[in-house]
Image (cartoon, rainbow, N blue to C red):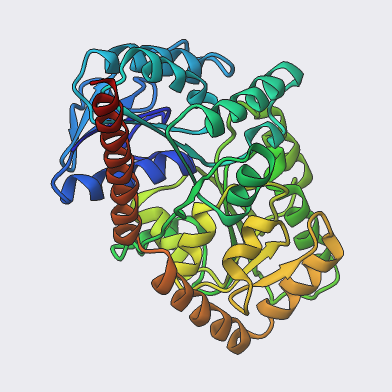
Amino acid sequence: MKIAFIGQKGVPTHSGGVEKHVEKLSTRLAQLGHEVTVYTRPHYTPATLSSFHGVRLVSLPSIATKHLDAITHTFLATMHALFQDYDVIHYHSIGPSVLAIVPRILKPRSRVISTFHSRDYFHKKWGFFARNFLKAAEFFTCKVPERTITVSQDLNRYAREFYHCPAVYIPNGAEVEMDASDETLVRWGLRPGRYALSVSRLVGHKGIHYLIKAFMELEDTNKLPNNYKLVIAGAPANTKEYENYLHAMASGRENILFVGEQRGRDLAALFTHAGVFVQPSENEGMSMALLEAMAYGLPVIVSDIAPNLEVVRGGYGAVFPVRNTEALKRELAYYINRPDEAKRLGDSARMRIDDAFSWDAIARQTVEVYQETIDTHSREYQWTSNHAA
C-alpha cells in the first residue's frame, strides 16, 4: 500500500505531538512493508534528508509564519500528491484537513483519511479569525474525508454527536527510550527522584502557570523536600509572550528550571529519573507526553479534562480540577512526600500503557482502516458499474 502523510511539520520529531504521532506511525507502517511518504517543511526537517527509517521524505516550502505555515505547506503537498500514485492520502490535524476536499474531487483513485488530533481553536495562541478558520476546518475534517480517525474517545464522542461523523477511535501511543544520558542530570544539577517534570509546548492552554504557582506556594510553606526542583521542558509555539510571562513568574526561584525543548537521550533521562510528572492542561487531544511519562512508570498528576481522564481513570493517575491551584498543590505535596505511594501509582501507570497504547497495535489498526476504506470503495464502484451496465 502506498501512503502519504500531509499536515505535519516533518520527521524526525523535534517537538509537537502530531509530529511524534506521524513519526511513530509512519515508521511502523514502513516496517509492515508499506511505501510511506511524509511531507516535510525545511524549517523543521532539513531539505537534504530524503528518508528516515524506511519512510520517504518529500521537502516542500511554506510561508513560515504563525498563520500561513501549515496551510501553505499543506496546499503544496496536496498538489504534489495529486500527481503520485498513492493508495491513501492521510491528513493530520483539522487545519490541514480543510484541503482534503481537493483529492476527493481531483484524485478519486486515492482514498482520503483525516486524523482529528485536537480541537485546536481552544489553543490560546490563536486569535479570532484563526479560531473561526479552525472551527470551519473541523467541519471539513469530520465531513469530507472518507474516514475520520480520532485520537481520543472524547473527540470520538464529539465528532459523532456534533457532526454525526462515524469516526474511528485509534489512540496515540507511547514507548520508552532506554538509552538515557546520565550526563543530563549532572548538567542541570538534578538528582534522581528529586524533581517534578512537565513536558509541553509553552502555550497558555497547557496551564504551566498553574503548576509554577502551586510549586512556589509549596516551597514557600516548606511542604517540599529540601532543594526539590520543578523542571519545565518545552519551547514556545509562536507564544514568546507567554514564555516571558512564565519566566517572570519564576524569577529568582533557583529550584524552577526551564530547560527548553528536549528530545532523544536527554528527554529520556528527564523522564527516567523524575519523581512525578504533572500535566495541568486546560485542553488536549490526547497528550503524547502524558502517555510517555506513564510508559516510563512515572506517577502522573493531571487536570480533570476528558482526554486526561480517559487515560488515567481507574487509579492510573492522580487528578485535580482544571485551573484549581489549591487542589494541584495538595496532589503534588502528597506524592512528592510519599515515595512509596508515588511508586505504586507509577507502576500502575506503566501497566496501563503496556496494555492499551502500543504503537505496533496502533499501526495495525490504522492499516485496517485504510484497507476497509479501500474495500468499501471497491464494492461501491463494482455495484455502480454493474447497475450502469
From the viewer's perspective, tell me whether residue 37 is left or right of residue 221: left
Q: Nearer the viewer, residue 260 or 222?
A: 260
Whole-percent x and y of residue 145? 45, 30
Whole-percent x and y of residue 104? 39, 20
Q: Is residue 274 above or below residue 166?
A: below
Whole-percent x and y of residue 366? 34, 49
Q: Nearer the viewer, residue 167 or 39?
A: 167
User: In this rendering, does residue 385 appear at all?
Assistant: yes
Where is residue 365, by image quadrant?
bottom left
Count of numbered marks = 0
From the viewer's perspective, tell me whether residue 206 is left or right of residue 2: right
**What's the residue at 24%, 28% (across, down)?**
386
Where is residue 160, by image quadrant?
top right
Q: Nearer the viewer, residue 160 or 380?
A: 380
**What's the residue at 34%, 58% (across, down)?**
359
**What's the residue at 49%, 16% (across, down)?**
71
